[in-house]
Image: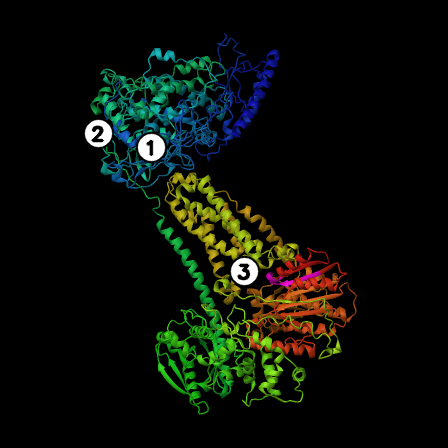
Amino acid sequence: MRLYIKHIGLVFYVFLVTCSLLSNAQTLQDPTTKTGTTDSYTTAVQGSTATPPETTSAQSTQSNVTTRNDVTTQSDATTQGDVTTKSRVVTTESRSTTKQTEITTKKGDGEDDHGYDSEEEEYIAEYEGYDGWYNNLAHPDWGGAEMALTRRVPPAYVDGVYYPSGADRPNPFDISDATMKGETGSGSLLKRTAFMTFFGQQVVEEILDAQRAGCPPEYFNIKIPSGHRYRKYIPLDEMPFLRSRYDMNTGFNPSVPREQLNEITPWIDGGLVYGTTKAWADALRSFKDGKLASNEDRGEPQFPSENIIGLPMANPPPPAESDQHTLRDVTRFFKLGNPRGDENPYLLSFGILWFRWHNYWADRIKREDTTGKMNDEMIFNEARKWVIGTYQKLVWYEWLPAFLNMDEAEMEENAYDGYKPYIHPQVSHIFQSAAMRFGHTLVVPGVARRDKDCDFFRTTKDSSFTPEKYNPIGRIGTRTCNSFWNPQLPIRETGMESYLMGMASQHCEREDNIILEDLRGNVFGRLDFSRRDLMAINIQRGRDHGLPDYNTARRAYGLKARKTFEEINPYCNNTQEAAIPCSILTENLANVYNGDINKVDIWPGGLLETTKNGPGELFRTVILDQFRRIRDGDRFWFENDVGGPFTKEEQEIIWNITIHDVLILATDINEGDIQKDPFHFYEGEKCYDEAVEAFNLTISEHELDNCTDPYTFDYFKGSEVSFVLTFLAAGVWAIGCVVLLYVLSRNRRKMINESRKAQRRKSRKSAKETTRLYSTREWCGDGQSERPIAVRLGPGKSITVLNDRGNKTYRTIDLAIHQKITLLVCPDQRRKMMTIVIEKEYDLVMKFDTEEERNAFISDIESFLTDPAIGVGRERREVHQAEMLRMANTKVQRQKTLERFFRVAFAQAFKLDVDPDDITEFKSEIAKDVLTCELTKQEFAEALSMKSDSVFVDQMFDLVDKDNSGTVSFREFLDIIVIFARGNPDDKLELMFNMYDVDHSGMLTREEFKKMLKSMMEVVSADLEPSQLEQVVQTMFSSAGFESKNELSLEDFNQLMGEHKEELSNASLQIQGQEAAPVQQETKTHAPRGTVIHRGNAPSRAKKTIIRAYANKGQGEGSGNKGGGVKGGIQRRQTRSVQIETVQAAYPKTDSEKVFGQLKRFIENERLKIFWLVLYTLVLAAVFAERAYYYSIEREFAGLRRIAGYGVTVTRGAASAMMFTFSSLLVTMCRNLITRLRETFLHRFIPFDSALAMHKIIALYALFFSVMHTIGHGINFYHIASQPPNDLTCLFRDFFHRSHVLPKFHYWCWQTITGFTGVLLVLLACVMYVFATQYARRNVFNLFWLTHNMYVIFYILMVLHGSGRLVQPPFFWFFFLGPAILFTLDKLVSISRKKAEIAVFKAELLPSDVTALTFKRPTSFEYKSGQWVRVACKTLGSGEYHPFTLTSAPHEDHLSLHIRAVGPWTTNIRHTYDPNTVREHPYPKLYIDGPYGEGHQDWYQFEVAVLVGGGIGVTPFASILKDIVNKASSNTRFPCKKVYFIWVTRTQKHYEWLCDIIREVEEKDTTDLVSTHIFITQFYQKFDLRTTMLYICERHFQKIANRSLFTGLQSTTHFGRPDLPSFFNSLQDEHPDVSKIGVFSCGPPGMTNGVESACVEMNKFDGAAFIHHFENF
């Protein structure tokens, strides 16, 4: 894109040039326009458009004047520079070429070099840009900053794309030690000076900067060999090495391998002085007289201004400050164009020199501007042009010949022959990574400073910050290795002139292979590795850039490949030319590369070519090639005659300027203070003898202070305390939330307990002596919660345990069957506990509030037991609390014993194998417990699922308890079970007869027979009027011919029940899950041998027995009966066509079948919920996996992934999962939307009623990923806080910190918006989740509601958390935006809804946890039967609405709801309207919203409607049935002609309110519109014999009363589940003319699915279509 923009600019540029040419042509033809000035150095800036080389110098004066006026205004604006732009960052502004300049030079009366008249001639030049772009008009990007290096040798990446080369080459440390180590101090053979060496360093800084590491950082560390000196100081195995920055558009395939970047321009264009962006240049300017800003404000006008604005200059830690281990502020540096210009005092000296050189030219231009028309901008640009021109000349024609020792012939061969736009100037990889590094061998270990009198300065304490132990004071020169990044100290001490003169008076190191230790082992590094081996880095850098081997490079440059190591330097045996001994090649180099010359790296190979003339053949060729391309491809080269920046005369001025002139003109050095050629130092020149005397022309490292030792640094240092305290505080906060919840809950319970205590004290005072009530708490066993109870002593010989309100009995202890009670009293633990030990029963362990209450109870129970009317012995013992609890026989332990009791009894009765887990040997302790265990009447009743005071239980218990001991022993229980198991019908009838023959007279009176029927009625909680019961008895007696008998003998009883012997023969007890085997009168059958009983709930052996289905028999009978207890004498028509059969369920035979059955039923009932939960989980997993994959694979070498490993993979995946889950939570709370969608067909596919459950599940998912994210970031923050600051600047570009600042953990965690909001989110999440637990909702509901409504703050923090852009751009809004909009709109709907308070005037707590509410109907409230409303309770939160079906009818003046407690809100509503809670207060008011429709409201539109309700699912039909009653009684006409109501329920007793409605329908339905069938499924779990007797009585009762014995309704009662397919088939026969039958079902999914399947099956055939509408609860 950047290139396209530049091409567009080029087109625009050509357009302007064309216009200019046309304008110039017209001007030349019109002599009247020729006016102008001839002032020397008068300039004008003509906008930003460059004049092409083809443009002639004869320009229109009129045009020039106009342009000057325009640009004068513009130039004022250009003075506003942005100094905040980072180093070497190319801006769009700086890519355009700089201002075009006009230079009019006065020549006198004659013609100038161009042949134009002096009064008319003007030369128009163009100022060079800063960033190198548009130097080449055909290729604007050639030579631009931030462009890729060019390759002059083929790449050799291992994978051909980006992986570094040289994987099979030796360790760079080994190469460095073997080939570049040696004694220094030998001077240059060619008398080159240190001035020439360090001038060369700043030349490199002018054309090349590829030192900055890539971003994200890529480490290519160098392994430290064992025994290396680094291992003594630094406990690391590798020296850090960061790969170079590269063009992100490269490195993807072998066709486009990775190309590293040159961050500056390759042109010699003054970047060293002015920087490579206009913003940087503006930051250096004073904006006064065209000068660069000096440090005059601080009294140092000779130096550039200090970097007080914080320009991002290079700022590594000064390695000499080994004791401080700190970074220093970049403001200590001088502002220079070269960001690395403050590396050492020698480089800084040249930086100051060019600063002064610019200001020299600015002063000169200002001085020569006699017109005064040149403003600051004009002067600056003109001075810059002259600085660049002179610098180009000095580099190419003075320094380069000295560096390469070029003679005149070679210079002539490489003479400039004009601008060549086809030449690419970019620096090559081999030049950057190898050839130009030849200067390293010339670097000196230190530089001596001198004054004009040849006196050399000695170092003082002000020369550096080197610790005293390294002896830095009194040395002849400043040590190179100890001067890094503190250069201003010695320069301020003696002035930069002392360094320039000193460098010119000192020979550089000899041209050989030896590198001084200051570079080869002691060059600057990072804090964690303060000293590095630059030679190893050189080798590694070449490999990083994919450089091939040495021979490949030679071939690429047309040089002959070397076959032997000795051939590398043919002059090694030539004493005159030799600079390197042959042994270095044949021994050291050959050994380190294992004799393979084709693996030699370019850097060591090229270095070892060195001769005394300088670089060897390869490096010399590379360097000359590079500088030729830079010069020849530069349109702004000072020698360019065609469109160049200078005229011939100006070129001559530049040719006459030497480096010596620059030193004289720009510094305080005078003529004669320094030799004419500072690049060489010969005998006889200024200060030569003094230099010989002082340091023999070349300083040895032994004459200088030692380099400071390497050191390492732990970047985590300083973060330890904040890291530990932060996470410790988070943990304490979470624990504190839990503790706070516990304290608040405890205080609330304490308040409640105090209130209850007060109530109990009040109750005790008012209670009668015979019914004293004691409130306490019962300990139920380990792991069981305590429960509040009330103990009542009496009346009679009993102790009753009730609930704390005294309205529910938990247990009754019959003292009549006990001789002694043991009281265990606890003497420790505040003396609040005691235990009542009852033989053959479980213990009662009580915990009182105070010791006084316990003592009062002990006193009273002892008095109670010793009362003569009670007469029970007592024993009192003191036992420590721990021992008491260990000895206690709890209900749980008793239950286990009873389970074994029943299992063994059944095994004996049915001759089954005994479960080894129950009893292994009858002599064992377990067998003893079983055989000696005795059942109390209450336990016996519980085994039958009946009340202990039931007549049936009394009779059966008395029958079984043969010894009248008050308990049933194992043998007694086994005897009765055997009769059930293997007895014939006569045996069973005799058992029933004896049960109710109370006086054992052998005769059963009518009253006793009635008592038998009543006891059976108790089983099903059915009520029967005395007259109806008398009718049943009379009918049964009459049918047997006993009309006149008042007593029945056993034979009479057998005769009375004779017609039902078939049923009785089948009524045998059986183990759960096995069908009853038919028992014949003469043949006994047994259960199969080998069956082992493994049943979890053993008492269910007595409860859950199975009877074969008798319901099919006799259905439809009684249709001819009239009257019998029916008001109005309505006759119910039961046609033969309509038949409803029952389907019996087979019980599982094994534990696995039982578990499978439970699982199957669960899946059937919850399949939609399971589907959506699994789908959501899969989507959530995909969201997590996408980010995890992205950071593991796609960004494997990027960002945090490089420093935190797979930790960032987990945290980023968890972050995305958090975004998804927390956003999803909002959708689950869009109550209005969910309500509306529930009305649509979508309710069949989406369980909208489970939104709250889904909300909780998603919240748990969110919590899981939040914990994962938090812990992961704790680890990540540790990694971040332990990274180098430069790496962090790269990784977190949006988080700026100064280069001397080491961001610690507390910065990232507490001073970034991401970290700080993350902390707040963690704290807030702790509060919200802790107070959202069931414990909190139950105990401190108001706090739950308050904390949960902090979600607004939570989401705001989440948005802010992501906006910090710490790791990645924020995309939380991708997940959040949609749900947030939905939720907001939903909230607005809720807010806009009118909330009218409605008074509740009746509330009932019905069985099955059903709460019936009746409340006032609003005046304007209109609805249809079957519709529903949304209800909110004022005390539970006026904004929390829940949907419920109305059970009232449209014609009624009130509204009613029947709400079953199945969730937190419905449970709370039941508690809210509990009479014990409300007491004397009015009922809390309600808010209602609705009504809303559903499919059930359309029942009347079908001619035939079938209503199928299951359990609480009958509530929609309550309203419909009431509506039917109203329509029937008012003769309202409507399409529906027949309604079949099918009610499937476990027991109708739980829904007596519906029975009342059905009864009302039967009374008012005079047209036989409704046919009702009730299916009761509970009886399958009762005793078969008793159930059979009930069935027999039901048949007799139905015959005579035309109503059910169980429900009292005329509706037919069935045992089992309806066979719907057969029923629907019979409907088609009954109603052949009906084309559509509406089927409406409501209940559990299993039931509605069965209805749907039946409808689908019927719709496969011709006949009426069954249209199914259903709702699930």
Residue 576 in the image: above or below residue 532: above
Is 1474 in front, or is 384? 1474
Residue reaching furthest front?
1082
Q: Indicate the secondary structure of the residue bearing disc 2.
A: helix
Whether residue 1397 is visible, yes or no, is no
Residue that badge 2 annotates: 703
Is 883 in front, or is 197? 883
The amino acid marked with disc number 2 is Glu
Residue 1464 in the figure: left or right of residue 592: right
Q: Main secondary structure of the magenta part?
A: strand
| Mark in the foreground, 2 or 1 | 2
Residue reaching furthest bottom?
868
Q: Are marks 3 and 1 in contact (CB under 8 Å)?
A: no
Residue 1137 in the image: above or below residue 1025: above
Residue that badge 1 annotates: 488
Q: How many marks?
A: 3
The amino acid marked with disc number 3 is Lys
Q: Is residue 781 magenta?
A: no
Neighbor class of circle 2 (other Cα within 10 Å; few <14, some 14-19, many 20+) is some
Q: Position of residue 1545 (x, y in %)?
A: 61, 69
Q: Which residues are magenta?
A: 1638-1647
Is 1418 in front, or is 874? 874
State which tag comes first along the sequence, 3 or 2.
2
